[in-house]
């Protein structure tokens, strides 16, 4: 590599659904188009925000295909492809490769709590059975396990493991990871609220929940950073910070789906066991969206 594989603002796409819980395919594709029109630098279907835990395998693959049909090479598609079953993760990754995704986002195995060696062997097996760039998704708050820097260094030595989505909110990690894995290893934040310090520590971008409802602001923040316009970065960050906070006061993607509903992106619908947010949270989301200029106050 001669630099990071990706950089910028990448929405972790939510999956619009009908009131009956079926995927709203047309609205999803229109949503992807809007994200591209708004300046998002890549799109990430069927991650956690896309409700991948409750999508069936065929639905998961279909949503990836729907996204690629719209993107048409205009922006990279980083397809969610993780599972706590290595065989299933290989299957999702091979499918992402087959249909033309630019990379696979592979979460650390959840619930079964593998050791560091187990994590290494899991990602190595996915790597060895596919031919697509892989982004390791480190999210201990959801998966219970984390990828140690030493393990990530070993993984980075495999040619197609090319980055990490760091959702730890530990701001000591970007520097440690960069020193261990090299400047070319792609460092993506998975915590919207930390993006400015993350960038200052050598990060390259963010796989973002907030970008679902504020894609232009999120993209503009990164572009201002690249241009060295730190006054603009600060102004945008001030607009977005309340939104970053309220989108996680109940289980995501509940709050962001309500925000999408306010913007006309479908029914405020999630699949059980997740629920729509409380009236109190609805008010907080509306207030934060108004503060960011996304809706009228």
Image (cartoon, rainbow, N blue to C red):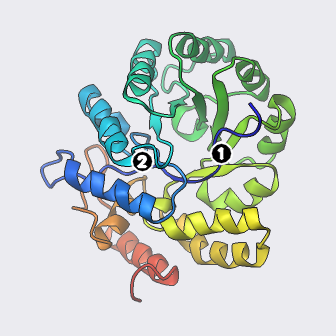
Quadrant housing the N terminus: top right
Provide residue 213's location: percent of width, then percent of height: 43, 66
Specify whether 272 is left or right of 151. Answer: left
Q: Residue furthest left?
A: 20
Q: Residue 264 — which label?
A: none
Residue on which the image places disc 1? 188
Q: Nearer the viewer, mark 2 or mark 1?
A: 1
Provide residue 101's location: percent of width, then percent of height: 45, 33
| Nearest to the observer: residue 91 or residue 190 | 91
Which residue is depicted at the point 51% across and 83% down?
Answer: 291
Provide residue 177's location: percent of width, then percent of height: 79, 36
Residue 106 appearing in the image: yes
Provide residue 150's location: percent of width, then percent of height: 79, 23
Specify whether 178 is left or right of 58. Answer: right
| Secondary structure of the residue carrying numbered label 1 | strand
Badge 2 or badge 1: first in the primary sequence: 2
* C-beta proximity under 8 Å, tags 2 and 1: no
Find the distance from the CA under tag 2 to the CA under tag 1: 16 Å
Specify whether 119 is left or right of 21. Answer: right
Residue on which the image places disc 2? 49
When the figure is inspected, residue 213 is found, relative to residue 133, above or below; the finding is: below
């Amino acid at each position: 590599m001669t630099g990071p594989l990706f950089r910028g603002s990448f929405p972790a796409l939510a999956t619009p659904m009908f009131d009956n819980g079926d995927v709203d395919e047309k609205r999803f594709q229109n949503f992807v188009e809007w994200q591209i029109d708004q300046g998002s630098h890549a799109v990430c279907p069927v991650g956690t925000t896309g409700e991948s835990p409750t999508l069936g395998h065929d639905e998961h693959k279909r949503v990836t295909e729907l996204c690629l049909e719209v993107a048409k090479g205009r922006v990279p598609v980083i397809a969610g492809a993780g599972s706590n079953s290595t065989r299933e993760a290989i299957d999702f990754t091979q499918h992402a490769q087959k249909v033309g995704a630019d990379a696979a986002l592979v979460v650390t195995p959840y619930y079964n709590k593998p050791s560091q060696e187990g994590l290494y062997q899991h990602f190595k097996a996915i790597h060895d059975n596919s031919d697509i760039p892989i982004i390791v998704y480190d999210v201990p708050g959801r998966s219970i396990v984390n990828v140690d820097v030493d393990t990530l260094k070993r993984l980075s030595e495999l040619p197609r493991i090319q980055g990490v989505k760091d959702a730890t909110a530990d701001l000591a990690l970007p520097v440690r990871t960069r020193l261990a894995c090299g400047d070319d290893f792609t460092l993506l934040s998975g915590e919207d609220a930390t993006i400015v310090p993350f960038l200052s520590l050598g990060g390259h971008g963010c796989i973002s929940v907030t970008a679902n409802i504020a894609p232009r602001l999120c993209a503009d923040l990164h572009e201002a950073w690249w241009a060295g316009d730190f006054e603009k970065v600060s102004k945008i960050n001030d607009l977005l910070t309340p939104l970053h906070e309220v989108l996680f006061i109940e289980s995501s993607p509940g709050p962001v789906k309500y925000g999408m509903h306010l913007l006309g992106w479908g029914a405020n619908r999630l699949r059980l066991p997740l629920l729509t947010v409380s009236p109190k949270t609805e008010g907080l989301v509306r207030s934060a969206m108004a503060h960011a200029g996304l809706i009228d106050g």
